[in-house]
Image: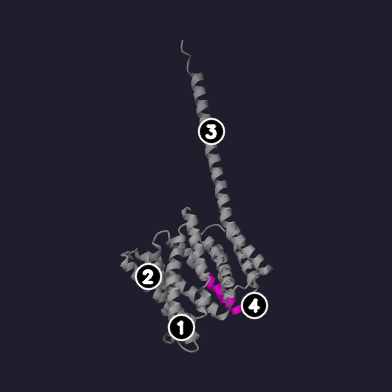
Amino acid sequence: MNGINRDFLHLNLVMLLNSFLPLVVRNISIPSVEIVFYRTLFAFLLLGTFLYYRKMSLKIPRNEMFKMLLSGFLTSAYSILLFISAKLSTLSVCLVGMATSSVWISLLQPILFRTKNQPLQELLGINAVVGLYIIFNSGFEYGWGLTVGIIASFFGAMLTIITSKLALKHSPFVVTFYQMMGAWVGTTLFLPIYQYYFSKNGLQLGNVTLPDLGFIFGLAFVLSIYAYSVMVRCMRTIPPFVVALVANLSPIYGIIFDLVMKGNGQHLNAGFYLGTGLLLASVLAYPLFNYYMRRFQEQQRQLREAQVSKDIDGRRISEVAVDIEEKPPFI
């Protein structure tokens, strides 16, 4: 198995783990902002301890550190809004909102990096969202939860694009450490604003229970350290848009797990199969299209090189013929 296929497999494992995130959040009693505060705090402290004992250096150029810390602010915004979406709506509606990240990436990447628009990416991203919408048939019963999830995906898309660039230069653990630290700092700075304008009952940092701490510790260790670091490493070989498309499989994994655990097949209706087909078509079409495009471009390159070589050989033959004609014959 080559490196790209191995990373693609690991990325699917990460998305399988991420499919449980909204379910875990709904079982924590404290509000979303407080969850993010503890989760990011635990994450960068645990990862810092791990790096210290592994004697891995955290020294990087200041400008790169600044980028990672700022991207951590995006992590904070994404996590807070995602958790709010999970609290306001259902697991399915929250995951539908998350799935719009592929659309955001197809729109943002040309703007941030001045690249050409990719109509195929936009069509596949929209197709993935349509597939998820059909699966869950969410309607507008949880309109606010869906809206917050879509806004969260905007920040998640920006984070994915920036992280894909950082992953090419630095260790995934170092990127994760500084981003989690930045996320904790960003959440801490937001707490006074949150307490004054948004929180009805004030901050509830002291109301965390032991079960809450257990769930938050699991989020920090499994999703914020392990899964996030693996995803950062996969971004070295997998484009951001493909990462976002594979992320759309999280709802499917969640449904399959729920069916296996409960042994209930009533959800497998025609809408489920139709939506899953559209979703899988989006995930598989892009890498297949890229594969055949690369093959086509490689064939075109080889044809051009062969033509150039043929032209050069033709000129050489002509030059030799001219030399023979110009030189007097030997007597």
Distance between mark 2 and mark 3 Cα atoms: 59 Å
Q: Dot 3: what SS?
A: helix
Secondary structure mostly taken by the magenta-highlighted segment of the chain? helix
User: Given the image, on which type of amino acid does mark 1 rest?
Assistant: Ile
Mark whose residue sits in front, 1 or 2:
2
Q: Dot 1: what SS?
A: helix
Image coords of residue 60 (percent x, y): 34, 63
Image coords of residue 289 (percent x, y): 59, 53
Q: Residue at x 39, y 69 (%)?
A: 178
Farthest residue, direction bottom: 201
Q: Which residue is mark 2?
A: 47
Farthest residue, direction top: 331
- Identify whether 90 is placed above or below 56: below
**Label drawn at residue 193:** 1
Instruction: Tell me the magenta residue range.
Output: 141-153
Image coords of residue 153 (percent x, y): 54, 70
Q: Earlier in the sequence, mark 4 or mark 3?
A: 4
Task: Give yes or no for residue 142 being in the magenta stretch.
Answer: yes
**Label drawn at residue 140:** 4
Distance between mark 1 and mark 2 Cα atoms: 28 Å
Q: Residue at x 58, y 50 (%)?
A: 292
Using the image as rendered, state which of residue 124 and residue 211 is in the foreground: 211
Mark whose residue sits in front, 4 or 3:
4
User: Given the image, on which type of amino acid does mark 2 rest?
Assistant: Leu
Mark whose residue sits in front, 2 or 3:
2
User: Given the image, on which type of amino acid does mark 4 rest?
Assistant: Phe
**Label drawn at residue 310:** 3
Q: Dot 4: what SS?
A: loop
Q: Earlier in the sequence, mark 2 or mark 3?
A: 2
Horizontal side, residue 67 vs residue 289: left or right: left
